[in-house]
Image: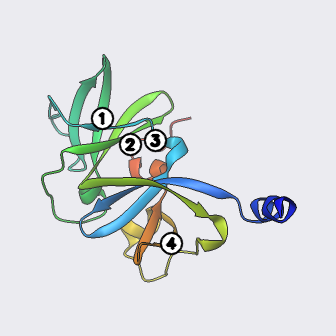
Amino acid sequence: MAIADAELEAVAPMTDYVTFRIGEQLCGVEAVGVQQVFRLRGLTPVPLAPPEIAGVMSLRGRIITAVRARTRLGLPPADESIAIGLEHDGDGYGLLVDSVGEVIGLDAATVGSPPGILPERWSDAVTGVSEHGGELLLILDAQKMLAPWTEGES
C-alpha cells in the first residue's frame, strides 16, 4: 500500500494554499509565498497613489505597502483590516482582504483552468479553480495581485 501512496504523490503533488475572502468569493494563494497574516495598524496614506494602494505601514521595523485586493479586482471598497504578507524583490506588501480562512492542501489533479467568463481584472490574477467545502475556490497569483506596482522590477 505504501508504494501505491508514493506513486499517487508523484502523480498528483499537493500544494498548500492560504484561503481568504474578497467580498463573498473564496480565494487562495500558494502558502509558500505568504510571509505572515497581520492586522493593519498605523496605516499612512500615500499622496497621489493609485486607489489600489491603501498606504504604507511599519511592521516590525519594515515598511510594508498595503494593496487593496477589492479595488485591484474592481469591487467596491470595504473596511479591510487584515492583510496577507507577501514579498517581491525584497519589498514587503500586505494584500488587504476581507477575512482569512485556513491553510488547505489541494491535489494538483483537482485544480482546473479558470473559466473564460471572468472579468479582465480577475482573469489577469486567477491561475486556477478548485472546490473546497462546497464552494468554488479561485486560486490567485499573489505576484499578479501586486501588479502593476511590481512590473518592470527584476
Left or right? Give the position of 147 relative to 112: left
| N-term-proximal mark, 2 vs 1 | 1
Mark 2 — residue?
149
| N-term-proximal mark, 3 vs 4 | 3
Give the percent coordinates (x, y) of residue 79.
12, 52
Mark 1 — residue?
65
Look at label 2 and name its amino acid: Trp
| N-term-proximal mark, 2 vs 3 | 3
Q: How many labels does the image show?
A: 4
Left or right? Give the position of 62 relative to 88: left
- Disc 4 to disc 2, C-alpha distance: 25 Å
Q: Which of marks 4 and 2 is in front?
A: 4
Dividing the picture into quadrants, the one containing residue 98 is: bottom left
Q: Nearer the viewer, mark 2 or mark 3?
A: 3
Are discs 2 and 1 less than 8 Å apart at CB?
A: yes
Give the percent coordinates (x, y) of residue 76.
16, 64
- Disc 2 to disc 1, C-alpha distance: 10 Å
- Disc 3 to disc 1, C-alpha distance: 15 Å
Q: Which mark identifies residue 129?
A: 4
Residue 17 drawn above or below residue 130: above
Mark 3 — residue?
34
- Disc 3 to disc 4, C-alpha distance: 19 Å
Q: Secondary structure under badge 2?
A: loop
Residue 148 drawn above or below residue 63: below
Dividing the picture into quadrants, the one containing residue 42 is: top left
* Residue at 43% from the left image edge and 83% from the top image edge: 117
Disc 2 packing (10 Å; few <14; some 14–19; many ≥20): some
